[in-house]
Amino acid sequence: MYQSMKGMLAKANAEGYAVMAINAFNLETARGVIKAAEVNAPIIIVLLQDHVMSFFDCDILTKPIVKMAEQSPVPVAINLDHGHDIAHLKRCLHEGFSSVMCDASAYDAEENARITRSVVELAQIYGASVEAEVGNMGCAEGADAHFTDDVMYTDPDVAIDFIKKTGIDALAVSYGSTHGDYPEGYVPTFHFDIVEKIKAATGAALVLHGGSGAGDDNMRRSVEAGINKINVGTDYMIAQREFVARSPAENPGYDYPTLVQDSWKAGIDTIKHYIEISGSTGKAR
């Protein structure tokens, strides 16, 4: 069943669980996300805008994934992740994305709200939902690696005002997580009071980005604090990368088409683990 995040997150918000949002970048990885959710859980396929623009653009990628979603027995949404290029975000809506993240967090609060509000008004025409971000999560990988620190945390008062001004369906909150793969053994410190204050004042659906490696206890406590959507990408991709790295050595006759087709299956257990932690197992109806 293909739908927007709006109904999914409203149900999660009312019943106190979170919906997993898993990063994919092609048909195989999207298929893995959907198959993992067929433990009777709602699921969100997250397509990072930078990936869409670099690999398969929205005019090529969207419709086949929508078809897979329509054929699935569980609710499936497609959400554009970190949509900072607004012109491209609009193209994604036109091509059939059921949800978009308008990421104008690099701007000041007023400009972020103005840009986001304009996207909300456009998305309503398409029946799509909108996520936004206040604050800024760091990135643990690459030349600009920088863990989330105090100055990057979401200011609850700014977030509360932002939600009221924009009419968004979900807000990504920075309270300790970082995008990417943490160093081995590192578990981030989460500031749950940020989530709790925003939730108490607005009742809005709130989002955790950078869920990979954040720690099972942090995730469970996040859901208790009011998180209703958890983004995970790195752990899903690592599981597939490790499968591809070891399989040719274990089976030298592994042909490439079969290797590619089998690789997405290697990440299914990872997704199922996070679905269980999020409390969304059995919540597809």
Image (cartoon, rainbow, N blue to C red):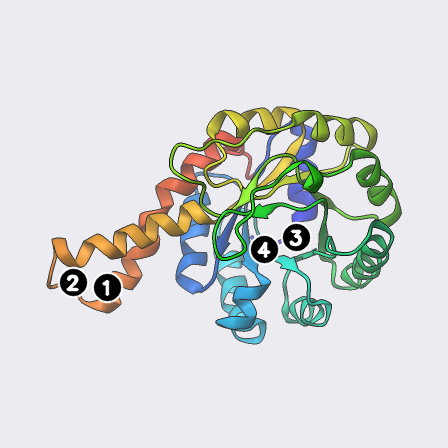
Nearer the observer, disc 1 or disc 4?
1
Disc 1 to disc 4: CB gap under 8 Å: no
Circle 4: is it few (<14), some (14-19), or many (20+) Cα within 10 Å?
Answer: many
Examine the rendering and report whether any part of residue 20 can be seen. Answer: no
Q: Residue at image x 83%, y 37%?
A: 160
Residue drawn at (70%, 47%) of the image = 6
Type of amino acid at the residue the image marks with label 3: Ser
Q: Which residue is mark 2?
A: 254
> What is the distance, in whole Å, between disc 1 and disc 2 at their CAs?
7 Å
Q: Is residue 88 above or below residue 247?
A: below
Q: Horizontally, is 171 left or right of 218 in the view?
A: right
Q: Which quadrant would the C terminus be assigned to in this image?
A: top right
Residue 156 coordinates in the image, percent (x, y): 78, 34
The CA span between labels 4 and 3 is 7 Å
Circles 1 and 2: CB distance less than 8 Å?
Answer: yes
N-term mark: 3 or 1: 3
Q: CA distance from mark 4 to mark 2?
A: 35 Å
Q: Which residue is mark 3?
A: 4
Disc 4 is placed on an element classified as loop
Question: As drawn, is 184 to the left or to the right of 136?
Answer: left
Q: Position of residue 283 (x, y in %)?
A: 55, 35
Q: Nearer the viewer, mark 4 or mark 3?
A: 3
Measure the C-alpha gap from mark 1 to mark 4.
28 Å
Does label 4 or label 2 sit earlier along the sequence? 4
Q: Which mark is residue 258?
A: 1
Give amino acid for label 1.
Thr
Please give the residue where the numbered disc 4 appears in the rendered image: 2
Q: Secondary structure at mark 1?
A: helix
Q: Amino acid at mark 2?
A: Tyr
